[in-house]
Image: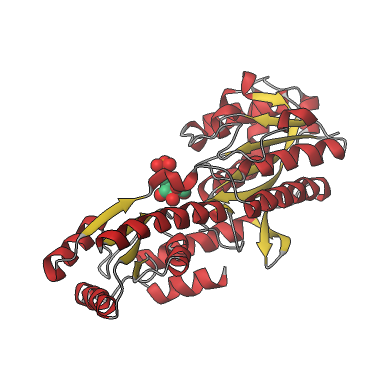
Amino acid sequence: GRGIAVFTSGGDSQGMNAAVRSCVRMAIYLGCKVYFIREGYQGMVDGGDNIVEAQWASVSGIIHKGGTVIGSARCMEFKERPGRLKAAKNLIKNGISNLVIIGGDGSLTGANLFRQEWSSLLDELSSKGEITADQKMKFNHLNIVGLVGSIDNDFCGTDMTIGTDSALHRIVEAVDATTSTAFSHQRVFIIEVMGRHCGYLALISAICCEADYMFVPEEPPPDNWPELLCATLIQARNAGQRQNTIILSEGAIDRQGNPITGEMVKKVIVDAVELDTRVTVLGHIQRGGNPSAFDRILGCRMGAEAVIALMEAKPDADPVVVSLEGNQAVMLPLMKCVEKTKAVGQAMADKNWQMAIDLRGKS
Ligand code: F6P
């Protein structure tokens, strides 16, 4: 059979293990040899023990674990051609010409570049005598399928990325916990959530936790937000509420593009309305812990689909990304999705907020 390798890259997320497990088992079921590449692209560049054949039992007892059991890394070497050359050699040495990559948009962009360069990498390896003419012919196509693993849900093309649902569970639990102490002391809690430049985690958790106010990068608040915020808090107190919750996305900015931080929001509240206020930054707690049932199923489905897509791919097929559309797993062109994702970032950099919201909405 054709060698398939699976690896995880970039920031980890809950549900990656379910995806790894499902890739391995579907590949074995279809009669393929399947490999783990440990430590992401770094393991591909370094080779050796980082590339190991997986067995049916190698992926037992991992579906409930957070993170990724095969390790992940943000790799600088792979960003340069010499690193990619080493990686190509290591794949060929192990008989691998199919890759399943589980990662965020940066990692998926790297995969696409690798795929585009593949034949020139083979030319160079063969001219240096590092691979045989036979190997060059046998491995002249590299097929790639991507799965999006990220808690941020910031990738255009898929309704949900692997890990987002679990991160939301973590956030909701944490906010609920602050709400009870806030109630006792009649406090305001500002909770900073992750998401990089994407407000999805903030938006959904704000709804789920009855937040009084929310800050997201895609829709910076009006310049008079301090007054609006304080008025909202006071109105809630006047209506009998004993506490307030404010959800702040870590990427929140004002209309000039300057960051809005938890301490800034706190100062506004304390100075203007003298409410007892605390800031809680949830941090990596959101990315840890066991994956939710949804993320386990999402990982399982996407992993299986990825292997099937590889086996059905035409030799020169462009890389695809397994996406969730409604309740359907669909294959979309990887590069188009990456480009759309970059367009959202560009719209935000251009302060074209409406366009950023529209692009997110369509994705
Ligand atoms: O992309 C996932 C994410 O957790 C973001 O939400 C956050 O901004 C970033 O990664 C944190 O990166 P690191 O784990 O390198 O600190």
Q: Nearer the viewer, residue 334 or 167?
A: 167
Q: Is residue 342 left or right of residue 124?
A: left
* Residue 28: quarter of image: top right
**Above or below: residue 20 compared with residue 354:** above
Residue depicted at x 44% and y 74%: 355
Residue 231 image offset from top left, x and y in percent: 22, 78
Residue 22 image offset from top left, x and y in percent: 74, 42
Colour mapping used in the image: secondary structure
Residue depicted at x 46% and y 54%: 173
Q: How many marks?
A: 0
Residue depicted at x 87% and y 35%: 31
Q: Is residue 229 left or right of residue 93?
A: left
Quadrant occupied by the N terminus: top right
Residue furthest left in the image: 271
Q: Evaluate whether residue 353 shows in this view.
A: yes
Residue 356 image offset from top left, x and y in percent: 44, 70
* Residue 210: quarter of image: bottom left
Residue furthest front in the image: 184
Q: Evaluate whether residue 249 shows in this view.
A: no
Quadrant occupied by the C terminus: bottom right
**Above or below: residue 225 compared with residue 337:** below
**Above or below: residue 155 compared with residue 350:** above
Residue 195 image offset from top left, x and y in percent: 43, 55
